[in-house]
Amino acid sequence: MELVRPISKMPSLLCRVSFKKRLQETGAIESLREGRPDRFPLQVVQDVVNDLLRTWKIEGELQKIDRILGDEISQFKNQLNIHEVAIIACCQVMSYDRVREQLILIRPSNEPPELTQPKVKAWIQCIFQCERAKDSLFTKVERAAIIQLLHAVLPARSEKFPNVWKLLRAIGDDRVQELFPMAFVQKALLYSDYWDRLRDELETLQRSRRWLEAF
């Protein structure tokens, strides 16, 4: 006969609804949708998770936290933006392996219809916010690649066009291939407006004879 765990130790359906509702109320989804990482309410979404862990009385139990928060995150599968927000909210208290697993799992595939501009932007922002929340999740070269890709796919992030050489050097490093396979990066840039912006920037530099600024 299968033993039933005490309900006090398990997140209830009400808690699940509360988790989703509270994330929706933070404004984090709108921040990702609009491509404004500077407005992302990181501390607010982290507080949502911390409050729930205290309610569930599982603070400090890493294996249990990984399992339960992994289940909570899975409820948002194929729900753009809130899935990414849930990972960002949880990453500070989950293990290195589980967070990396989640980030790779939601990375858009290299082909349409899976690869779209909104998905690329949401995923890059998710990586960026996870780095803000817990920088030990990434190596130094991965962090450099995150910043360069963020500049490349989010024009609102910076008025200045990203340094082409820094972008190529960051994404071309073999040590970033687990998170940023070259095939994905190439398609991601194709599905953003990066190449249109690059062409406009090069034309501007050509007219002003400031070629070195491109590099």
Image (spheres, rainbow, N blue to C red):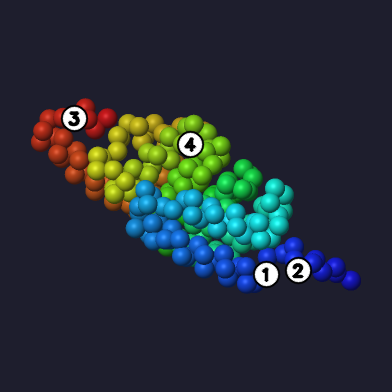
Where is mark 3, residue-wise?
A: 211
Q: CA distance from mark 3 to mark 1?
A: 60 Å
Where, quadrant-wise, is the C terminus in this rendering?
A: top left
Where is mark 1, residue-wise?
A: 12
* In the image: residue 78, left or right of residue 160: right
Q: Are marks 1 and 2 in contact (CB under 8 Å)?
A: yes
Q: Are marks 3 and 1 in contact (CB under 8 Å)?
A: no
Going 39% across and 61% down the picture, which residue do you hit? 30
Give the answer, above or below, for where 197 lies relative to 117: above
Q: CA distance from mark 1 to mark 2?
A: 7 Å
Q: Amino acid at mark 3?
A: Trp
Where is mark 4, residue-wise?
A: 142
* In the image: residue 195, left or right of residue 94: left
* In the image: residue 28, left or right of residue 94: left
Q: CA distance from mark 4 to mark 2?
A: 41 Å
Q: CA distance from mark 3 to mark 4?
A: 28 Å
Residue closest to the eye, 193 or 70: 70
Q: Residues within 10 Å of mark 3 (few under 14, many from 20)?
A: some
Q: Tell us which disc is closer to us: 1 or 4.
A: 1
Number of marks in the rendered image: 4
Q: Tell us which disc is closer to us: 3 or 4.
A: 4
Give the answer, above or below, for where 59 lies relative to 177: below
Residue 131: give x, y in percent of width and height: 49, 42
Give the answer, above or below, for where 198 lies relative to 33: above
Residue closest to the eye, 148 or 203: 148
Going 34% across and 58% down the picture, which residue do you hit? 34
Q: Earlier in the sequence, mark 3 or mark 2?
A: 2
Where is mark 2, residue-wise?
A: 7
